[in-house]
Image (cartoon, rainbow, N blue to C red):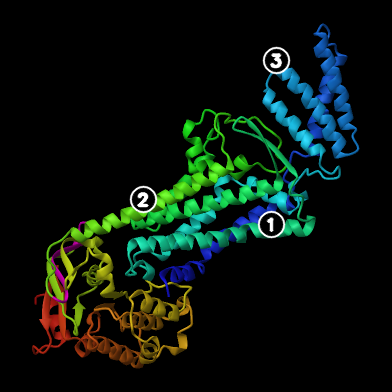
Amino acid sequence: MSYSKLLLKVVVREPIAWVTFGTLAVLLSLCVFLPYPLYGPELLKLTLRMDYESLSESFSNGSFDGAPDDLVESMHARVDYMSLALNAETNQDFYRALSKIYAIDEAQSSSGSLVGTSPLEEVAKKEYADAMAMVDGSVGYDYSNQLPGIPLLTVAPSTLPQFALSIPAIAIAFCISSATDRRKLLGSAAIPAGTSLLSRCLVGVVLSAIGLCAAIIPPFLIATGVRGFGDASYPIVFLRGGQIVEMGVGESALWTLGLMTFTWLFLVVVGVCISALAKNALAGPGVALALSLIPSAPNYYSVNSIWGPTLESLPFSYFCPWVVAGSCGAFPNVDLTPSYSLQPTNGLMVLAGWTILILFISAGGLYLRQRVMRRRGGVPAGNGLSLSDSTIAYGRNVLLSNVSLSLPRKSITGIIAPNGSGKTTLLEVLAGDTRRMREGELSIGGTRVTDEVAYALRVHYSPSDMRNMYPHMSTRFHLEAVKSLWNSTKNVADVVEMLGMESFLDKPCRVLSQGMARQASLAMACISGASFVLLDEPLNALDPIKAECAEKCIRWMAAQGSGVAISSHQPEEMDRLCDSFAFLVRGKIERVATGKGKSCREWFESLFTTGA
């Protein structure tokens, strides 16, 4: 099974993603039921009536006495057309009269008689009225809950805060980054970082497509079911880049969906790539969230925007689809960015270009980091797993100082110490997590830990808890994933039978008992076929029968050629299983072979009892 398929199976089961998809679908569907106001005939007539009453009053109180004859004549014509519009019986007649009014306003604006508007704005209004006059006289939308399916697609996104449209994409990036965290199974996979990054982005593309469908289709189907599909040629007129743009609502809907899709892909790739580079599941989604908030900044789309001429080239400029592609029922308004044309075609290219660039730079960065790491370090020592002259610490708290340890193959070594002495941390370091390793060398035969892929293929770590497992995935999934990722030839059915796991093989890990989880973790280690297997408390919480099966499995791994390291609090277990012991004593490692006349408990008491 490929890495991409494994990751997709995990991420598609994450509830966080589906909660955000569902929430966005609900928010977009609200305008199907709630009357979000549009610039339809009702609102236009309301403002027109106010202007009519004001202008009529101006004539009656003599405000135009002494005014130039041509201005008085224009105002009289304006009042007459206002009266025609207000008394129109059909929307077509209303918009025809409205077009005459805007023609008068455009002429006055051009001559300087009308202050506060530009001639281009008045021309845009006239073209809008002319376009609406061509529509069936019975069709007019005053509120969003009157819209059919196609027009609703252009209006619904504009009813939400801009960043709300981006939250699902950020959730996708978080789910992918969390699933591939270094502590998770798919984060420790022994595959090249570049391949892993491309697979994560591919999964992000697939999940984005699923998420957009889940969010967009419900409100569209509801509106279509109630009020029909709608007329794709229904006109939208607005100003963009100092130009009047007219398009059908169907074209606007396609651009809206396209811009949302490419915005999501951009944010997902940013989130995934930043997390991969930083090796932190929260870093990428945090950056993506910050980017999604940029267009909400005051005056972002203003002619005085701090971004200036770069506005057209920035990906966040196209996060608001209604600014670029218009929206049904939006009346032509003043174009705040007359010098910069945010065209949808350019938007798709900018978003795609930035997405590819970020992916390319991130993949190159990961590749260079791996190359640099491979060149670091000295000459690997021995044929086994070797840690030499190393200091391991949490911040200033030094757990082990200047220690060395060698684990041979076909042998079982017990890692023994009181709680808090660093047993688990030591196993994590030996597994390749060198964050706590300040100095020294770590290698397996001729492979240094800095050669991440090759090292990871030769070691498998089973923690004492379920931190590397996925709560919503089955035990069977984890076993098959390990077999695939470690390129193992082990038979899953044989290991399952050896450990007696048939009863919970298809149960999700979140319902497993502690003992079942330990069995699953041990089975994963066994199936990996790794040269070295590191087991943290593998027999805890197991009943005597299951413990006996687990011990048989551990001996079988050693007999098959694996070097096994075990940490445990049970001296009797260590005596039965181990060929040697490594005691962590006051920041040092005391290596003791078995058969020297003392049991594990006796060695423990002699090394750790006060006064020894």
Q: Which residue is mark 3?
A: 112
User: What whole-number distance in Å separates the C-alpha atoms at marks 3 and 1?
Assistant: 46 Å
Residue 597 vs residue 197, the one in the foreground = 197
Residue 572 percent across, percent down from the top left: 22, 88
Three-letter code for the amino acid on which mark 2 is drawn: Ile
Q: What is the secondary structure assignment of the residue under circle 2?
A: helix
Relative depth, front residue between 579 and 147? 147
Write the start and end of the magenta stretch as one range: 383-398
Determine the main secondary structure of the stretch shown in magenta: strand
Residue 445 rendering spot, x and y as whole percentages: 16, 73
Q: Residue 498, labelled with which disc?
A: none
Provide the residue designation for mark 2.
Answer: 361
First in sequence: mark 3 vs mark 1: 3
| Above or below, comparing residue 99 to residue 258 in the picture | above
| CA neighbours of label 3 inside 10 A, class few (<14), some (14 to 19), many (20+) | few
Residue assigned mark 1:
219
